[in-house]
Amino acid sequence: MAASRAKYGLPSLLALIVCLHIPRAVQAQAGPPFLTNDPGTPGNANFEINIGAMPAIARGVSSYQVPQIDLNFGVGDRVQLTYEIPYVLQTSGGRSQSGWSNAYPGFKWRFLDQGEDGWQASIFPQAEAGTSSLERQKDIAVAGPRYLLPIEITRKLGPLNVDFEAGWYLAGHGPGERILGLVAGRPVTQRLELDAEVYDDRADVGAPHATTLDLGGRYRLARGFIALFMVGRSLNGSSQGQPEIMGYAGIQILLSDYGRTLTAEP
């Protein structure tokens, strides 16, 4: 699954969810609504489409990605093509700006797959595409391109499914930057999955410099439709533009056979 590369920010999360008792109906996973990605791909000729809204409210600045569009297509069983782009509404100092922010085309390759109960790992290179000078003047986008090279690892640990991601922005426009994400969770019913995330985003110079704690999950609405939800906040306090509260609410649409039918299972 693919997650948004929003710029918002590792104490252990396992104690938060160890007490949940569930059937193994749905595998807990990273990806939307979380910032961390996992090695999962949609499957050959399948689409995964995530459409959501993501607010981030900090001291003096409010930003809303409405919509946040995340399109994924499976090529074979281990490769995913991705295109992500948000439309940003931002208010700062009494002024409001809006427009399309940086897009993230990329592809994921799951190079290690030991099955549902074994290790899985992938790489997910993406390019942070450039935008017009107008969008940069509005402060809703940054100069590009930059290149992100992350690795994702998934492993089932007892009753928990744990996903870890680490990534680095390579040479290009803008400062160097490192991301770390950890998601742990499990299903609680046949339809509902709950997860917790710690996400750390650090630039070499200036913002972002944030660590966030996020709680959320997924609820299966019907064949091919899954509701996504998350709420979180900074662990660094409200200084330096850290988000006092952030969230995600959206829908995931799963399509098979080049989009001809709705997918029965995620």
Image: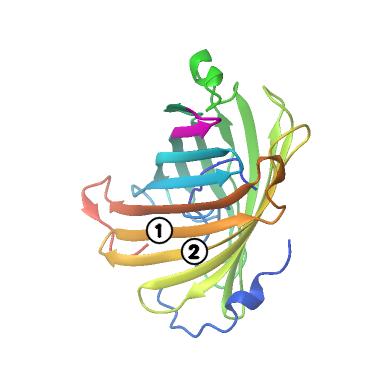
Mainly helix, strand or loop, the magenta region? strand
Task: Using the rendered image of the protein, determine whether residue 8 is visible from the camera's viewpoint.
Answer: yes
Q: From the viewer's side, name the closer residue of 261 and 206.
A: 206
Which residue is nearer to you in this view: 54 or 105? Answer: 54
Residue at 57% across / 84% down in the picture? 19
Report the colour scheme.
rainbow
Say which residue label 1 marks.
228
Residue 75 visible in the snapshot: no
Give the image quarter of residue 223. bottom left
- Left or right: 226, with 154 as reference point: left
Q: Report the Cα–Cα distance between label 2 and label 1.
A: 8 Å
- Label 2 belongs to which residue? 216
The magenta region covers 88-95
Disc 1 residue crowd, few under 14, some 14–19, many 20+, Cα 10 Å? many
- The amino acid sitting under disc 2 is Gly
CB within 8 Å, label 2 to label 1: yes
Along the line of sight, which residue is nearer the eye, 212 or 260?
A: 212
As helix, strand or loop, the secondary structure at mark 2 comes to: strand
Q: Within 10 angstroms of label 2, few (less than 14), some, or many (20 or more) residues?
A: many
The residue depicted at 39 percent of the width and 72 percent of the height is: 192
